[in-house]
Image (cartoon, rainbow, N blue to C red):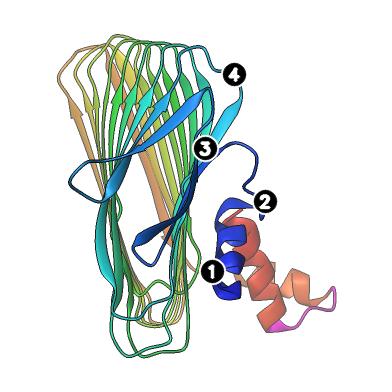
Amino acid sequence: MLSDVQKAMLKELTGVSDFSKGAFNIRANGASAGRQSTDNIRIEPKSGGAGLDIYIAPGVRDDHVRIPVVMTESGLKEEVFNDFHVGEGAIVTIVAGCGIHNCGCDDSQHDGIHRFFIARGAQVKYVEKHIGQGDGTGRRLLNPVTEVHQAEDSLLEMEMSQLRGVDETERTTTATLLAGARLMVRERLLTGGHERAISRYAVSLDGAGATADIVSRGVARDDSLQSLDLKISGNAPCRGHTECDSIIMDRGHIIAVPTLEAANVDAQLVHEAAIGRIAGDQLNKLMTLGLTPAEAEARIIAGFLR
């Protein structure tokens, strides 16, 4: 039986409270709290370890699967391996993410390792959200690892957000793209206190016409740290673009490390980066409309991370 706290986190992670329709797996405090397969999407537990194999049938149109994780037990640490096998020509949305509510004194940690095997012509939208809650002294730790393998003419759109309460996170994303494959990543980060958020991306464009567009937006407040390491390797006639836009506040610390590696004369690779403070004229304009300084600041940050 899920607690009210767990139900509230599930709603925030997935956007729904009714899981009766569609394929899903809910993981709560290290165990399955509900699972459902459909004719188009089959979810099977891995033998001999924590994790799932999710099989999405070829040719599926506009289907979805949800695999959220919630943790409310202080001191719980787990590592979970999920593999997504997306059939040729399928169009599917995958909603994941983890919420940790820690009211105890021990650290709680979830390390999710996701591998995507996306067949020719398939289109995948992947939404991953991380949230941290609870007034305990134990830390909330999340370390997602994402490994992507895209076949010819496939598309993967990734939306990742972490907007509060996670004390430490290390995100590692690797991807290999064959001819005509497309990868789009949109990452949003908001850190405060002494939180640390580290993101590493390594994308290899191995086929003619492969493209990657990776954009990260972050706001570092208080004494928090954000570090972003973006690498795109162009090994064929391809196009790659990375962008890092960050707002630094208080005593925050932001590091942006772009790496572009071209091994083909027709590889077109571009990086953009900007780190700065909130402009005074933006604050003044909103304050003239009746907002307090804190309200104006919050409005600007919300718009920036949208």
Callout 2, which amino acid? Answer: Asp
User: Which of the 4 image quarters holds residue 203?
Assistant: top left
Q: Which residues are magenta?
A: 289-293
Q: Which residue occupies the foreground of this view, 303 or 1? A: 1
Q: Residue at x 62, y 48 (%)?
A: 19
Disc 3/disc 1 C-alpha distance (Å): 19 Å
Residue at mark 4: 61
In the structure shown, which secondary structural element does the residue marked by tag 2 occupy? loop
State if disc 2 and disc 3 touch (CB < 8 Å). no
Q: Which residue occupies the foreground of this view, 45 or 267? A: 45
Q: Residue at x 72, y 74 (%)?
A: 284
Q: Give left or right: position of 95 versus 204.
A: right
User: Which of the 4 image quarters holds residue 179?
Assistant: top left
Indicate which label's residue lies in the foreground, 2 or 4: 2
User: Which of the 4 image quarters holds residue 45?
Assistant: top left
Horizontal and vertical percent position of residue 267: 26, 17
Residue at mark 3: 65
Q: Is residue 221 magenta?
A: no
Indicate which label's residue lies in the foreground, 1 or 4: 1
**Crowdedness of circle 4 by 10 Å Cα count: few (<14), some, many (20+)?**
some
Q: Earlier in the sequence, mark 3 or mark 1?
A: 1
Horizontal and vertical percent position of residue 260: 23, 34
In the structure shown, which secondary structural element does the residue marked by tag 3 occupy? strand
State if disc 4 and disc 1 touch (CB < 8 Å). no
Disc 3/disc 2 C-alpha distance (Å): 13 Å
